[in-house]
Amino acid sequence: MKSSLIVFSTALLLAATGAFAQGAGPTDPQIAHIVVTANQVDIDAGKLAETKGTSKEVRDFGKMMVTDHSGVNKQATELVTKLKVKPEDNPTSQSLKAGGEENVKKLQGLSGAAFDKAYIAHEVAYHQAVLDAVDKTLIPNAKNEELKALIVKVRPAFVAHLEHATHLQSSLGK
């Protein structure tokens, strides 16, 4: 499981930075789609953790992921509606979606402490990769100031999620 986490988080960062290397970077509609997809990946895994998590802390963390990332998606949807921007599918969002589906499938096959450890390990790797993509690709390439402001506004939540997941990971014994 650990190697698939590394592959997934590396794929996220490479997809976010490499998919647009030949161009000027992702466009605002592509960035909007990446943001929504990244949040949906965490919502899907969080829903699974709410029901399959063994420890209360893991279930609570899953619930927090669903709540927080649903809120970000609501804000993003309201913004793109206001701006009359249609989120555009792209290689990064496709990679995120596929990786999220693969993660959920793997997690569904686990139970007990193995589930808790795998879920939290993925959350640590995923949030770090998302922060790297936010800092190196999404914020620098966002042209619309309101879109950029939304990403900057929600960035501290990703940092808090990473710190919380890291703390949980150490309490679960990695």
Image (cartoon, helix red, strand yellow):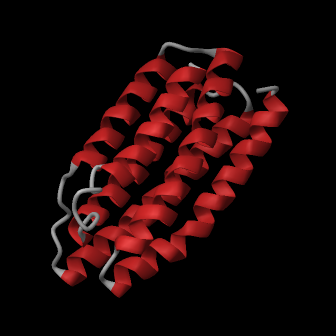
Picture residue at 60% right of the left edge, 51% below the top = 64
Residue furthest out toward the bottom:
145
Q: Residue placed at 29% from the left, 64% from the top?
A: 25
Residue at x 23% of width, y 83% of height: 82
Residue found at x 64% / y 32% = 121
**Depicted 152 relative to depicted 10: above or below:** below
Asked whether 14 or 112 is in front, the reply is: 14
Q: Nearer the viewer, residue 144 or 45?
A: 144
Q: Of residues 53 and 91, which is closer to you in this image?
A: 91
Asked whether, in this view, residue 31 is left or right of residue 108, the answer is left
In x, y percent, where is residue 106? 46, 19
Viewer-proximal residue among 41 and 3: 3
Residue 86 horizontal/vertical position (percent):
15, 68
Residue 165 is situated, as x and y percent measured from the top left of the image, at 69, 44
Q: Quadrant location of the C terminus?
A: top right
Question: Hey, which quadrant is residue 73 in on the image?
Answer: bottom left
Q: Position of residue 36 (x, y in %)?
A: 34, 57
- For the N terminus, which image quadrant? top right
